[in-house]
Amino acid sequence: MKKAFLLMFIFLILENLRGFAQDYSNKGTDFWIPYAGHIDSTSSRMALYISSDNNTNGQVELAGNIIPFSVVANQAATIEISPAVYAVYNGQSDGIGIGKGIHVISAKPIVVYAHILNQARSGSTLVLPTNVLGRDYIALAYTQSTNNVFTAKSQITVVGVENNTLIEIKPVATDILNLHLANIPFLVTLNKGDVYQYQSFIDLTGSSIKSVSNAGIGCKPIAVFTGSTWTSFNCANASGGDNLYQQLFPIGTWGKNFVTAPFANRESDIFRIIVKDPATIVTLNGNILNSNTLHNGIYYEYQNANGTANAPFFVDQCR
C-alpha cells in the first residue's frame, strides 16, 4: 500500500509586499488552464470544479469548442474534459501546443479548481484568474520516481494569455529531447491560448520562467504550471504514485511568515521552502536553517519524523 505524503511548497522573498495582498484573489471572471502531461497520456481525463457565492453562468472555451455552465451559489459545478473529445492534452516534451489552452469565463466572479486524473493517479490545483497573473516565476516539482525512470517526467507548462508573448526559460535540467541544455536560457513566443511544455527526467525545481520585452512591447502576464507526470516521492514501496499539477504563484506574491497544519494520520510530510536569494535567513520552528543545506541554491527540504506529522509547522524569514 502506498505511503501517504504531503508535499507542501512554501515561497519566501525579500521584497516588501505592502499594499499588494488586498488586490490578490483567486476569485475572478477569466482564467487560463493547461491540460498538462500525465503518465497515462490521453487515457487520463480532466475535470474543472467551479463555484461561486452567487448564481452565475459562463463558458469553457477549448479547442474551438464551447462548454456552457451554470453555477448555483455555494455549490460546485463540474466540467468534464476528455482528451478523446477535446484536443487540449499537452503531451509534447519540448514544444508548443497551438491553441491548447483552456479558457474559462463567467458573468460573475467564480473560483476554479483543475483536476487531472486516471484511476488512482490524481493531481489538482487551484487556478488563478488572469488579472492576478505575473511575469516572473520559479518552478517547483519533485524528484522523479526511479521505477518509472523513462516515463515519469518533471515538467513546466506555460499558457500564453496575450498574443506575441515572449518568454525566457532557464531550466535547471536538460529536456528529455536534448533540445535545451541545463542552465542556458532560451526564448519561446506564445500567442493567446498557446501552451508551451518542457519536460525532463530530472527534477526541474528552481528553473526560472519569465516573460520579457518583445520588440519594445512590455512584458506580458503568463500562467505557469509545474509538477510531474508521476512520482511516488520517497515511498519505500514505489508501486503507487500520482501526477503533480500545481499553478505557480508569481514571485511578487511570495510571503515571509507561514504556519501549516498537516493532515492527520500520515506517516510523514515533506516540505520545500523556496528562496529567491540564497542569503535569506529562514527559521523553521524557531531554528535557523543551515544555508549549506540549500538544494541547487534555491530550496530547503524538510521531512517530519514518523509520528510528528500532526504537529504545527512554523516558517519565518528575515534578511
Image (cartoon, helix red, strand yellow):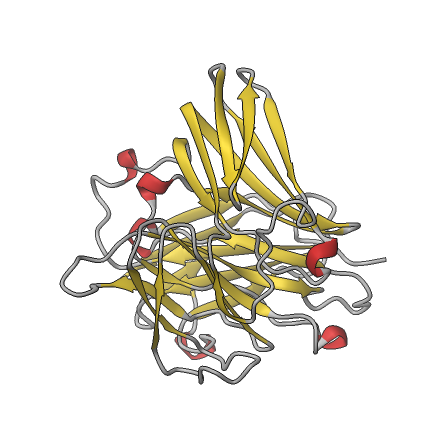
> What residue do we see at 50% from left, 56% from top?
9
For the point 23% across and 56% down, the residue is 15
Whether residue 47 is visible to the viewer of this picture, yes or no, is yes
Query: What is the count of numbered marks?
Result: 0
- Residue at 70% of width from left, 68% of height from top? 234
Picture layout, residue 52 above or below residue 161: above
Which residue occupies the extreme front position in the image? 64
Q: Dividing the image into 4 quarters, which one contains the C terminus?
A: bottom left
Q: Is residue 241 left or right of residue 112?
A: right
Camera-nearest residue between 80 and 285: 80
Asked if residue 260 lies left or right of residue 267, the reply is left
In the depicted structure, whether residue 174 falls above or below residue 284: below
Residue at position x 60%, y 77% in the image: 201
* Quarter of the figure that contains the N terminus: bottom right
Q: Is residue 27 above or below residue 139?
A: above
The answer to whether one can see residue 285 in this image is no
Residue 102 percent across, percent down from the top left: 50, 45
Is 229 on the left or on the right of 71, as rendered?
Answer: right
